[in-house]
Amino acid sequence: MTKKKLLLLPGDGIGPEVMAEVERVLAWLNESGRAQFEYETDLVGGCAYDAHGEAISDAAMDKAHAADAVILGAVGGPKWANVPYAQRPEAGLLRLRKDMKLFANLRPAICYPALTEASSLKREVVEGLDLMIVRELTGGVYFGEPKEIVTLENGERRAVDSQLYYEHEIERIARVAFDLARARGKRLASVEKHNVMRTGVLWKSVVTRVHEDYKDIELTHVLADNCAMQLVKWPKQFDTIVTDNLFGDVLSDLAAMSTGSLGMLPSASLGAKDANGRRPALYEPVHGSAPDIAGKGVANPIATIGSLGMALRYSFDLGKEADLLDAAIAGVLAKGLRTPDIMQDGKTKIGTAEMGEAIVGELKRLSA
Ligand code: IPM
Ligand code: MG
């Protein structure tokens, strides 16, 4: 078996704690002979700024490019609230996305049966929810130029961010979304605001054109504000959603929290396959660095372990192992084990490391 190379970037806050549990799962995968991973670790975010004065060093970027996949914990925290804008922790994550050309961000929002009561929405609204948000990740207002604050002659300051999209950027993300929808419920909602934005008009027309190649998929166009409303009203009407960088940022938090389990949801950021079939990829939990609970050993590692699961599926063609990992997570939850963020009456409260141990225990049991 050829060894697969991972770069682990634990980052800030709870990142190192949850990443330690990913290492635990990796160790089991290696020991059980199901896969052969080797990995190295580096800094990203505030910790990288403290060490190098940059949110990610060139050396770490080189490792990221060389790896078969990158797994990231989380970046940011109050400690770095006043560092220069270009060196803020989030800049490390944005550089990884941009330089690795990770244009497709897959954010599943799944309501685990064991957690239906944890949602702030009614049980019948979220029970069985399995939604995939496909977010464009390297274009739009996140990266559009000009992006600046200028001081005018009269001394007043004016800020500008630029939302811009090329046809090819919309077309390639639409194709990723149509392909995913085809493997899922065969329904795709394309989300923009063509009633106000030129980028929305172009988005809608390009997605409509790409649909010609995917006639078996039911396509609807939904305005972003209406989509937010519908996601709270009846999220199960959606199967796959494709949207731009900023709307995707907002709608994916909304959808994730409605499942009651922000600490549970993984994500994948993928680039295009090269001539050798190699595809740049970064996997990370949807949640942030949670500085308020960092270092206490109580963070939920499931989203980060689930991100490793997505890596098994999308980068390493280890679908069976990914299914096994998903089943182990579901099994541990069914046993009533809970980290504090998903704790409910009558369940057993455990910490980060115990959750990782329980998942590995369940992996062993399921594969015995
Ligand atoms: C996310 C985060 C990032 C984003 C931040 C940390 C830059 O909110 O991945 O959704 O806005 O994309
Ligand atoms: Mg976000």
Image (tube, rainbow, N blue to C red):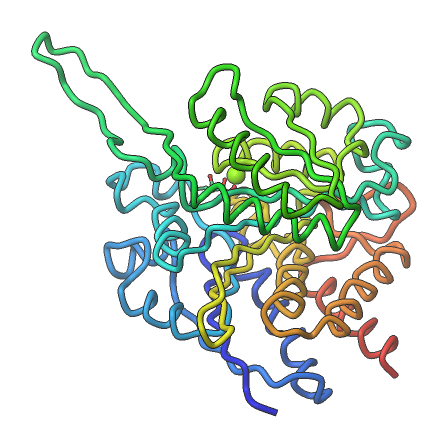
Identify whether 67 is placed above or below 48. below
Which of the two residues, 224 or 283, is positioned nearer the viewer here? 224
Q: Nearer the viewer, residue 351 or 57?
A: 57
Q: Residue at x 50, y 44 (%)?
A: 171
Q: Is residue 288 toward the left or the right of residue 49 in the image?
A: right
Residue farthest left in this picture: 153
| Residue at the farthest bottom position | 1
Q: Position of residue 198 (x, y in %)?
A: 42, 22
> In this image, 45 relative to 249: left or right?
left
Question: Can you say which quadrant of the picture contains the N terminus?
Answer: bottom right
Q: Residue at x 87, y 75 (%)?
A: 366
Q: Count all numbered tags in the image, as a single digit.
A: 0
- Left or right: 252 as drawn, with respect to 338: left
Tell me the quarter of the picture where residue 156 sits.
Answer: top left
Indicate the position of residue 252 as horizontal and vertical percent values. Answer: 61, 37
Q: Is residue 21 above or below residue 159?
A: below
Residue at 55% x, 59% y is 283
For this orientation, the residue located farthest to the front is 212
**Which residue is at 32% across, 36% downward?**
144
x and y, in percent, of residue 335 in the image? 90, 59
Query: Furthest residue to the top?
Result: 154
User: Residue 206 in the image: x percent, y percent?
Assistant: 52, 36
Q: Quadrant of the C terminus?
A: bottom right
